[in-house]
């Protein structure tokens, strides 16, 4: 079993998260009467982002009197101009805080600054955003490293592997980096493709994996940057009559977990994320900022956990 570098140690991050949680619980805040949230995520067709939005609303309702919460929820479709307009709209509608899953890390600093100048905290969730007041994400390097280390173990540390990549946001870049570092430890594993973009969707996974199987029909392992693309990749394998490879992923999506239990599944497992917890922490931090409180922490990384068919009963999934 491999070890992560010290700067990526999930044990340290677990302590980091626990200290964040304790800090949140320790604060006794004056309750506001009403909260309006502006939430811009990447893809509302992905259940992950729906769970994130639900977590944000649930935490906001727990913080204000009489559950008086309004959420303005938009999907950017990874489009910078569209997401900029969404954040501008939040500002014009005088939301109390903004949660953003940024399409590009450094594309929104100016509009984020405009929001902050109006007293609106901006929280980066799922991916980083330059200029945000605080950031809450999965420890994506650790998630990619974990999934690909499990994949390597399953392959007995040898064979041909492909990475099904995605949009160039920080979370995906870090997952791929973690995967590559894990696989690089095993000389008998050959990474033969890593730059094909699935778009992070089931349709993109199907199309990309169909191309991969045409070009590399004898691969043994696949790492997908998220579960929707992994499910599409599995569909491509089924359509091609291929059962000589397995797929590791990141997310913990209900549809992936359900498919993981099937007798004919090609899915090895997934490094699960916690989208609701991520959003809950972000809303709490934004709420504290609204009340003039200084944040003890400005970046929280939530470790991923490996879920497969063997440990599914004991796993916490969203």
Image: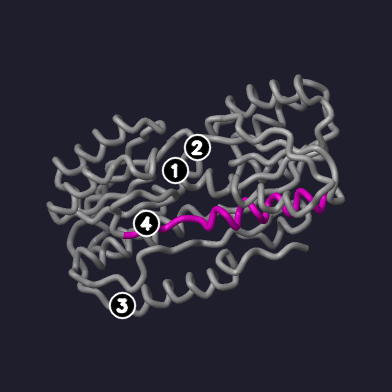
Pair 4/1: label in front = 1
Residue 94 position, x and y percent, is 14, 47
- Residue at label 1? 50
Residue 62 position, x and y percent, is 32, 63
Q: CA distance from mark 1 to mark 2?
A: 7 Å
Asked whether residue 126 appears in the rendered view, the answer is: yes
Q: Secondary structure at mark 2?
A: loop
Instruction: Using a 10 Å C-alpha cutoff, classify the residue at mark 4 as few (fewer than 14 neighbours), some (14 to 19) or many (20 or more).
Output: some
Q: Secondary structure at mark 4?
A: helix
- Residue at label 2? 46
Instruction: Using a 10 Å C-alpha cutoff, classify the residue at mark 3 as few (fewer than 14 neighbours), some (14 to 19) or many (20 or more).
Output: few
Q: Are marks 1 and 2 in contact (CB under 8 Å)?
A: yes
- The overriding secondary structure of the stretch rendered in magenta is helix
Circle count: 4
Q: CA distance from mark 4 to mark 3?
A: 18 Å
Mark 1 or mark 3, earlier in chain: 3
> Which residues make up the magenta segment?
134-154
- Residue at label 4? 58
In the picture, the disc for residue 251 is: none
Asked whether residue 246 appears in the rendered view, the answer is: no
Residue 207 position, x and y percent, is 63, 22
Residue at 69% over, 54% down: 307
Is residue 147 found inside the magenta-colored segment of the image? yes
Q: CA distance from mark 1 to mark 3?
A: 28 Å
Mark 4 or mark 3, earlier in chain: 3
Q: Secondary structure at mark 1?
A: helix
Q: Is residue 280 left or right of residue 87?
A: right
Q: Is residue 121 left or right of residue 205?
A: left
- Residue at label 3? 27
Q: Quadrant of residue 225?
A: top right
Instruction: Using a 10 Å C-alpha cutoff, classify the residue at mark 2 as few (fewer than 14 neighbours), some (14 to 19) or many (20 or more).
Output: some
């Amino acid at each position: 079993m491999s070890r992560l570098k010290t700067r990526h140690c999930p044990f340290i991050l677990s302590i980091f998260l626990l200290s964040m949680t304790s800090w949140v619980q320790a604060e006794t805040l004056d309750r506001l009467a009403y909260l309006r949230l502006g939430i811009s995520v990447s893809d509302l067709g992905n259940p992950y982002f729906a769970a994130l939005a639900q977590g944000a609303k649930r935490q906001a309702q727990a913080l204000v009197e009489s559950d008086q919460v309004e959420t303005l929820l938009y999907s950017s479709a990874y489009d910078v101009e569209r997401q900029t307009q969404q954040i501008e709209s939040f500002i014009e509608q005088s939301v109390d805080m903004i949660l953003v899953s940024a399409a590009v890390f450094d594309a929104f600093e100016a509009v984020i600054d405009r929001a902050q100048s109006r007293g609106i905290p901006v929280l980066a969730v799922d991916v980083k955003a330059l200029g945000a007041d605080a950031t809450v994400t999965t420890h994506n390097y650790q998630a990619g490293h974990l999934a690909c280390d499990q994949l390597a173990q399953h392959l007995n540390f040898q064979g041909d592997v492909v990475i099904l990549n995605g949009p160039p946001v920080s979370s995906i870049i870090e997952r791929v980096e973690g995967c590559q570092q894990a696989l690089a430890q095993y000389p008998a594993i050959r990474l033969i493709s890593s730059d094909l973009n699935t778009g992070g969707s089931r349709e993109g996974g199907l199309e990309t994996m169909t191309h991969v199987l045409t070009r590399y029909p004898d691969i043994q392992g696949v790492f997908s940057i998220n579960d929707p693309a992994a499910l599409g990749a599995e569909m491509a394998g089924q359509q091609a009559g291929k059962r000589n490879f397995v797929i590791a992923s990141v997310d913990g999506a209900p549809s992936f977990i359900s498919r993981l239990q099937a007798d004919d599944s090609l899915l090895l497992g997934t490094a699960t994320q916690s989208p609701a917890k991520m959003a809950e922490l972000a809303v709490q931090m934004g709420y504290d900022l609204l009340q003039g409180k200084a944040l003890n922490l400005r970046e929280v990384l939530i470790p991923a956990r490996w879920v497969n068919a063997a440990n599914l009963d004991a796993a916490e999934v969203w």
